[in-house]
Image (cartoon, coloured by chain):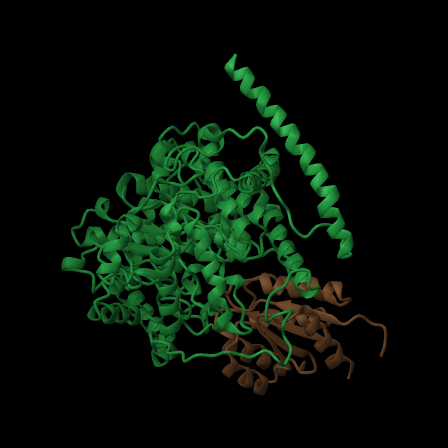
Chain colours: A green, B brown
Amino acid sequence: MKDDQNKCDCREKREQIAREEKSWRENLVNKRVSRYNLEKSPTCFYTPNAIKDFDFLEKVGFPGQYPFTAGNAPFDFAKANEKLAAQANYRPDWGGSRGVGKYGGFGAAADYRDYLKRMHSMGRFGGPNMAFDLVTQCGYDSDSPMAEGEVGRVGVAVDSFRDFCVIYEPYTGDLEIDKVPSNFTINAPCAIIIAMYAELARSRGVDPAALRGTPQNDILKEFIARGTYIYPAGPSLRLFRDTLQFMRKHMPLLNVNSIGGYHIREAGATRTQDLAFSLANAAAYIQEGIKAGLDPNDFLTKFTFNAFGGSMEIYKEIAFHRASRRMYARMLKEDFGVTNPKAMTIRQPITAHIGCSSTTLQRTLNNWPRAVVGGVAAGMTGSLPGVFPPWDEPLGLGHSQEAVQMQLDATRILMHETGLTDVCDPWAGSYFMESLTDELEAEALAEMDKIRGMGGAVAAIESGYMPKAVAKSAYEKQKRIESQEDLVVGVNCYTSDLELEVTINREVEATYDPALMATCEERQKASLRELKRTRDGRTAASLLSSLRTHAKDENRNLMPDICDCVKNDCTLQEICDALREVFGEAQPVKL
Amino acid sequence: MNNKKIRVLIAKPGLDGHERGARIIAYGLRDAGFEVIYTGLRQSPEQIVSAALQEDVDVIGLSILSGAHLSLTQKVVDQLKSKKAEDILLIVGGVIPEQDVASLKEMGVAGVFTAGSAVSQVAGFISESVAC
């Protein structure tokens, strides 16, 4: 009886609000719209009627509980230690003994080793957080004609297991590889790097089961966004499966992958495409694991995400993260029967941010307030209020110490002076935010259905649908900027001579020695010659030949073969070439 | 001026996989009335110049964000010289530090377009340069 009475009251209230809203619109809004000669109101206002059937437990729930809309946890390590960090003057940027160091890598293996040693001498003891050069990422050796001019440029060159071992020379004793984690930003040849990591441990008498860290290992988004693919999507996914089985069996502490929506959005995808394509990719990986007989309740606890993309549209980014957590958890529960709550969260280092593509070269210092907006959005979506990137990002010369200091301080100001992160999901229940979250979820689900209809992520990549959709969205965005439909301060508006270009002193730490960069290609080639001269060539050739044979059997896990190849000094390109012969090569997408 | 459409080859030399800019320029120039051919990723300087000759283009646009712009552009310039195709207008876009712009121009690059450049700027530059 009482319930019925409540419902009745509710309906009456709603009808009353609807009536009032109508009259407000007619009497107030529309009059203003015509007074200012507009076509429609430039603002919105939300009432309880925007979320009529809102069910709190179904849509939001509690932080750390299904469907995780309100966050992965009530608070995390950083929040728990917030005060301590301030009192101890903690600087997070160089990595402590628990984490990886700064993302980097350049030159020959020995150059990067020496860089890491230098970091250690400065008290920066984080594990290797490796950037590989494009040559390695695309499965070539430094002596390939494809490598000319690119060796050691955007990361370190790794041609062989010997190179990999050289990089790790400074990691012994207190920094032994079972004590510090490693990150590997590599995808197409990721199986080879994982094999090297395991073999390095074995060669040192360390159990691979003790190794920690995160290989990126997200090949599908390479076809949509980042472009460092080798084989077609199908066989690429098979290699992912092989690494997944291998890691769960031999390296259970290692994260399996780092699924990137970030790259997809930066390549131009809309928010909806970013969400739908990333989750479609995740679904393909999960499906592959289940097909291989693995339990998603187990392996999903080691899936990670490399953050989704970001933008300056703060409300929409907040809704995006609420929707993404809910969609992922629901997909796992409903489509894959996952029951372990620990397997259902989007594990990622940060949540919302503006994305590097929101920064501008014009009046570069303006990127600081831009990044702060991202920090606010992060703080409101269950993450450290990380202000990212440093304002000098688009200058392309490495971040200056000043810009990094300003980034750090901005984050600290948000942490300690504003109370921003004292409330979990502060937007929960907001008429506006809940309806925006629902809207975004519905759009992304529709896009995911479309991909499912095409046969899933692999099919939507092979047909060119996903890469082309992203390219078109990027172009649409550019058109909106050029027509001044979207405004970017200093780029397409406020560009008169009256504006001032504000600059400050910039000190860029000389991390990478240009003299070493200039000679690294020759040195890598010399090491390769030495390797090929001194190794047991017959064994190497026979191992490559069995790799080729076994690759033809789709059901066979190739990791043992790859480990043998690595251990016996087959080069990275030789291993990739053997697989190229069987799998073929992915073709670049035309317009 | 004749009515023949200006033909442009947009190319991604080297291993760099960032193709947002290249594709935007390709779509944009096409909408601006140019005939555009896009090579896709990972083209060698030889492949680029031979595609340019085969397609009889007036302009080559290179998009490079990997930091290898000096060496890759030099190779394309050398190829153009050896094929006696220096009349093809060469432009470069991508992440190009200011101090490298002069070096590129010395090599014979007609225009350099970095982040924030509008497609209309590029289109205008090409129309003017090819017309005269």
Q: Is residue A23 above or below residue A582?
A: above
Image position, residue B92 (x, y; %): 60, 75
Q: Is residue A540 above or below residue A433?
A: below
Q: Is residue A231 visible?
A: no
Examine the rendering and report whether any part of residue A302 can be seen: yes
Q: Residue furthest top?
A: A1
Q: Nearer the viewer, residue A78 or A575?
A: A78
Residue A342: x percent and y percent?
34, 35
State left or right for residue A502 relative to residue B31: left
Q: Nearer the viewer, residue A104 or A352?
A: A352
Q: Is residue A31 left or right of residue A293?
A: right
Q: Nearer the viewer, residue A79 or A476?
A: A79
How far across and how far down the image is residue B41, in percent? 56, 62
Q: Residue at image x 63%, y 52%? A: A468
Left or right of A324: which side holds A569?
Answer: left
Give the quarter of the figure containing the C terminus of chain A: bottom right
Q: Position of residue A171 (x, y in %)?
A: 20, 61
Q: Nearer the viewer, residue A425 or B77?
A: A425
Taking the spot 50% from the left edge, 65% from the top edge, the residue there is: B15
**Residue, x 63% and y 54% (percent of image)?**
A473
